Structures are given as structure tokens and as C-alpha cells.
Amino acid sequence: MIAALKELDILAADIGNAYLQAPARERVHTTGGPEFGPSRVGQTVIIVMAIYGLKSSGAAWHAQFSETLHGMNFKPSLADPDVWYHPACKENGFEYYKYILVYVDDLLAVSHNPSIIMKTIQKAYRLKEEPTPPKQYLGAVIKQWSIPNETRPIWAMSAANYIKEAIRCLELELSKAGKTLKGKPSTPMQGNYRPELDVSPLLDPEQANYYMSLIGILRWAVELGREDIYIDVCLLSSYMCQLRIGHLEQVMHIFAYLKHHKNSNMVFNPNYITWESDAFEHYDWSEFYKDAKEQLPPNAPTPRGHVVQINAFIDADHAGNRITR
């Protein structure tokens, strides 16, 4: 959305053998085997780079790459330390922030000219391929979208491929037990189901581990844009200490829903919406929130460029929990 709002371009890249480009954070040694060459078999070999498999290699690489980004005058954002920003200005005087999004060794550069950012990184690290506009990122399909009467490049994100593969793996596992995903549900969770009232038998340890792995898959689907299952996944995630057969059945219900509703897209629309105030009911909450005011971090960066408008639609379930309210 920011890229479209400020008319910026995006490039994606993947750093090759990232861990091997960072020094090890502690003294590590091993005994040389045949893979080290005939002359070093049996010798003590000191590990100087953060090889894959060491517990601290991820932290070593993060520290190494962070130093590189600091050297490029980027700063980590307050909300997410892996979203880096730097003030920039277009030729026409338009001020904005350019960004580098980092997920281990996967990079997204958002800028009026992101190739400059990527070329600077290429001087320090080897990239697997030349930077290109993103097609996939962290399991999500990234693509450009079109909106009537909109000339700016608009981006959309879809979890369709991730969900398709998750469904395939789940159905393969279910088939081993002679089971399948049932029905074509129109909602993520059954409308009359209340997880807090479920008194079905408890899951055994193996079933509980399976349940947790399925919840992990669903949580990542939410991260990739499936906001329609967000509330249901949150509810079913809150019973990890006492999981029941009914909870597992509802998880399967969510997967059945995704199987038949897998092609949704989250479109990042840069257009502003003018809301008519009389379209909403107004309530006076001053009795409950007398001194309420927006809290802004004192060290927040200075706003640059067009203002971002975020519109949230909430279907509130006030005091809906039948036990705790």
C-alpha cells in the first residue's frame, strides 16, 4: 500500500549462503572428517564462520547484516526491527521513506529507485539471483493489481499457493487414517459452536502435537492475508493447555473452509475513503474513558509523504465468552 500511495517500486532478492558470510559468535571447534580433505582427517578444526547448524548462526547473521544496513544509514523501525527505513527525496522534491524489509536472508527494497539499494547490498554479499519485482515472498504470491480509474501500480497478496500445499499435505495425512475433510462450509467455524463450552474428550499427547502443528499452519495463513479466519484461529489457539476432540474437529472445519475458499486476495488500495459521519451510530464513552487520548511515541520518526489511511471494520463479540464474559 505504501509503495502504491507514494508511487514507489519494489525489488526482491535472496542472499546466498547468508550464514556463511557472518563470523561465528563464539569459539567453536570440531574434529575433521573426510569432507575436510585427507590431510585434515582427525585434526581439530576451528569454525570461524557461522555455519548452518550452529544454534547462534541466526543471531550472528542478523548482527552482521544489521551492521551493513546501519552502514547504509538505514534505521530499524520502532514497530519491527527487521523493517529498516531511511529518509529520501524524489527529483520533484517529494519526501518519503525508503524501506528494506528483511526476513533472515529474504529482502524487499521499497524505493523510487530500489536498484540502488540492491546494488549496494550486492557489493557486500552474493545474491542468489538478480533482484526482480517480487512474485513470491515468505509463502505468499505477490502480484500487481488493477483498480478502475487508478493509474498507480497497486500490489496484492494471496495465500492461495500456501493453502493449496497445506491442504494437500493434510489430506495426504488424513487418507492414511481413512479420513477426509468434510463438507463445503461457508464460514470458518460452525456458527453455533462455542469452544469454551466444549466438554468432548481430551486429546492425547500425539493428537495435541498434531493440533498445535495445524494451528501453526493456520496462523501463518493469517499472516499471509487470510484475515477471514483470524478470530477463529485465535480462539482455537487459546486452549493449548486443555485440547479436546471438538477443538480438533473445528480446526478441520477451518481447513475444509479454506479448501473451498482458497483464492482470495488482499489488495493494498492506496485510495482515500471519505466516510459520512452520519452513517455511524455515535456513543458517548467519556464516562468510561474520561482522560483517554492517543499515545504517540516521543521518538517516532517525522512523517513524510502522503498520509496512510487505515480503515478497520470490526464485528465485535462483546462479552461473548459464555463462561468468563
Image (cartoon, helix red, strand yellow):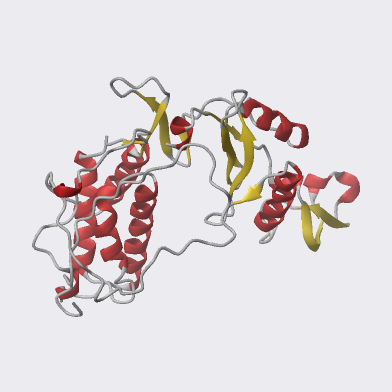
| Position of the C terminus by quadrant | bottom left
Residue 108, picture quadrant: top right
Could you tell me residue 56's position as x and y percent?
69, 60
Q: Which residue is painted at 19% across and 69% down in the image? A: 195
Could you tell me residue 231's position as x and y percent?
26, 58
Could you tell me residue 107's position as x and y percent?
59, 39
Rendered position, 318 above or below 135: below
Rendered position, 84 above or below 5: below
Could you tell me residue 38's position as x and y percent?
87, 45
Q: Which residue is painted at 28% across and 59% down in the image? A: 233
Residue 210, picture quadrant: bottom left
Rendered position, 119 above or below 320: above
**Furthest residue toward bottom:** 324
Q: Is residue 49 left or right of residue 206?
A: right
Residue 115, picture quadrant: top right
Count of all numbered marks drawn on residues in the image = 0
Q: Is residue 94 visible?
A: yes
Q: Is residue 17 left or right of residue 204?
A: right
Q: Is residue 110 visible?
A: no
Closer to us: 273 or 186 = 273
Q: Which residue is painted at 65% across and 55% down in the image? A: 58
Rendered position, 73 above or below 149: below
Q: Which residue is painted at 19% across and 39% down in the image? A: 260
Closer to us: 164 or 66 = 66
Closer to us: 23 or 315 = 315
Q: Is residue 315 left or right of residue 301?
A: left
**Furthest residue toward left:** 192
| Position of the N terminus by quadrant | top left
